[in-house]
Image (cartoon, rainbow, N blue to C red):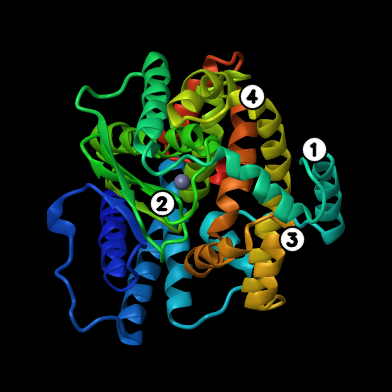
């Protein structure tokens, strides 16, 4: 079997798996002819077993190939699909085993003492007295973007992130995005980018939970520029169309590239808005459009930075405890409230994310550190960060490959 045939085999396999495991494929913009017909009969062990043996066949053919970046990337996709199929057939992996197979990464462990220490750091900065979670959520209310001005605020953030990205990198002329505001109670995510092919994306904002001013630029960069929308364009145009590598016409959700995508999207915020740029733009442009008082903007940013240091590790430990059966559902929710300072009404929403995505949660913060280390090591100036970041999505890459 030739390498191109193995790659096509993977695309066919992933599209078939997606018939039964909806959401396995996050985006597909390859040949329509590879898409299987819908199967109204639905999933069965027999079908998963069939796919598993197809997957093994492709892996066996691949190990005979020369080890270079394209084969290594393809192998990582097949290993992840294999693990996902085994899970569908009832095999149980621990949180760390799962993340190692799906994302080639195990998240560092953090003790409860560490969480308490980080919580203490935050205590003195949040105005008021009493329980920190309650105090934090009350304080944060003054930064809510109301639903009627949300599109105006978010689209101003998108326009700025896009402008900065287009100044730093070339994108195809037809490139564009659309924003949609949805109320999705089941999803567990708050914003999502759907890459549609031909440099187009739909970006959805989920209004089921309150939206805060600092999320505007974060999402504009993460979902759009230079995040998922731009990542999609680079894979599509540079790897699939230019090189003809068909495995890049598909983006499976649960695979090692996932950690680079999420980590790169989070890290992209500071590439597009370095130093104080985010805060300055928020104060000068976004707060006024949102009708919010910018007087406390700097204090709020500091508090949110400390909260991020706490909630990122708290969220991973909560998910790890829950998936591994050490924490019950209620205990996990309490953990979110206590250490991620989540509003008790929104802890259920956090659970939905964990129910749906499990160890995927590590991709954000662990991925951000991974991509930051890589980019900071390679880029000689802050303007060079753009090209190093773009290269990550314009070359076949896996987390293991960028760690050395
Ligand atoms: Zn994302």
Residue 366 pos. (x, y %) = 63, 47
With 105 as the anchor, is 216 left or right in this view? left
Quick one: SS at disc 3?
A: helix
Give the number of the mark in front: 3 or 1.
1
Measure the alpha-carbon separation of dots 4 and 1. 16 Å
Residue at 54% across, 42% down = 263
- Quadrant where the N terminus sits is bottom left
Compared with 260, 94 (above or below) is below
Front position in the image: 42 or 205 = 205
Compared with 119, 47 (above or below) is below
Write down the quadrant of residue 339 in the picture: bottom right
Residue 402 pos. (x, y %) = 58, 38
Compared with 126, 79 (above or below) is below
Mark 1 sits near ligand 1, with its Cβ under 8 Å away: no
Mark 3–mark 1 CB contact (< 8 Å): no
Residue named by callout 2 = 207
Residue 291 pos. (x, y %) = 47, 29
- Quadrant where the C terminus sits is top right
Front position in the image: 184 or 402 = 184
Mark 1–mark 2 CB contact (< 8 Å): no
Measure the alpha-carbon separation of dots 3 and 1. 17 Å
Name the disc covering residue 125, or none: 1
Q: Residues within 10 Å of mark 4 (few under 14, many from 20)?
A: few
Give the number of the mark in front: 4 or 1.
4
């Amino acid at each position: 079997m030739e390498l191109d045939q193995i790659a096509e085999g993977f695309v066919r396999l992933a599209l078939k798996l997606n018939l039964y495991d909806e959401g396995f494929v996050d985006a597909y913009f390859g040949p329509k002819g590879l898409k299987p017909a819908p199967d109204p009969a639905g999933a069965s062990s027999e079908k998963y077993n069939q796919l598993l043996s197809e997957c093994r066949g492709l892996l066996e053919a691949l190990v005979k190939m020369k080890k270079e970046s394209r084969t290594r990337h393809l192998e990582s996709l097949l290993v992840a699909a294999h693990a996902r199929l085994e899970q569908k057939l009832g095999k149980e992996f621990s949180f760390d085993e799962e993340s190692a197979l799906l994302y080639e990464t195990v998240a560092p462990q953090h003790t409860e003492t560490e969480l308490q220490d980080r919580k203490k750091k935050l205590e003195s900065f949040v105005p008021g007295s009493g329980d920190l979670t309650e105090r934090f959520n009350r304080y944060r209310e003054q930064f809510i973007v109301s639903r009627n001005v949300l599109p105006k605020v978010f689209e101003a953030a998108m326009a700025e992130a896009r402008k900065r990205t287009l100044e730093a990198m070339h994108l195809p002329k037809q490139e564009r995005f659309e924003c949609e505001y949805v109320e999705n109670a089941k999803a567990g995510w708050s914003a999502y980018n759907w890459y549609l092919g031909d440099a187009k994306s739909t970006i959805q904002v989920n209004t089921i939970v309150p939206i805060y001013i600092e999320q505007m630029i974060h999402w504009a960069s993460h979902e759009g520029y230079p995040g998922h929308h731009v990542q999609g364009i680079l894979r599509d145009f540079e790897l699939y169309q230019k090189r003809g590598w068909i495995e890049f016409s598909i983006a499976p959700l649960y695979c090692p590239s996932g950690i680079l995508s999420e980590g790169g999207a989070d890290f992209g915020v500071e590439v597009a808005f370095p130093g104080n740029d985010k805060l300055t733009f928020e104060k000068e442009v976004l707060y006024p459009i949102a009708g919010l008082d910018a007087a406390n903007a700097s204090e709020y940013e500091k508090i949110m930075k400390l909260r991020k240091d706490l909630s990122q590790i708290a969220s991973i430990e909560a998910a790890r405890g829950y998936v591994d059966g050490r924490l019950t559902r209620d205990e996990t929710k309490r953990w979110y409230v206590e250490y991620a300072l989540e509003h008790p009404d929104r802890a259920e929403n956090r659970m939905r994310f964990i129910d749906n995505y499990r160890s995927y949660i590590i991709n954000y913060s662990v991925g951000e550190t991974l991509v930051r280390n890589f980019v900071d090591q390679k880029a000689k100036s802050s303007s060079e960060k753009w090209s190093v970041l773009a290269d990550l999505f314009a070359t076949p890459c896996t987390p293991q490959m960028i760690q050395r």
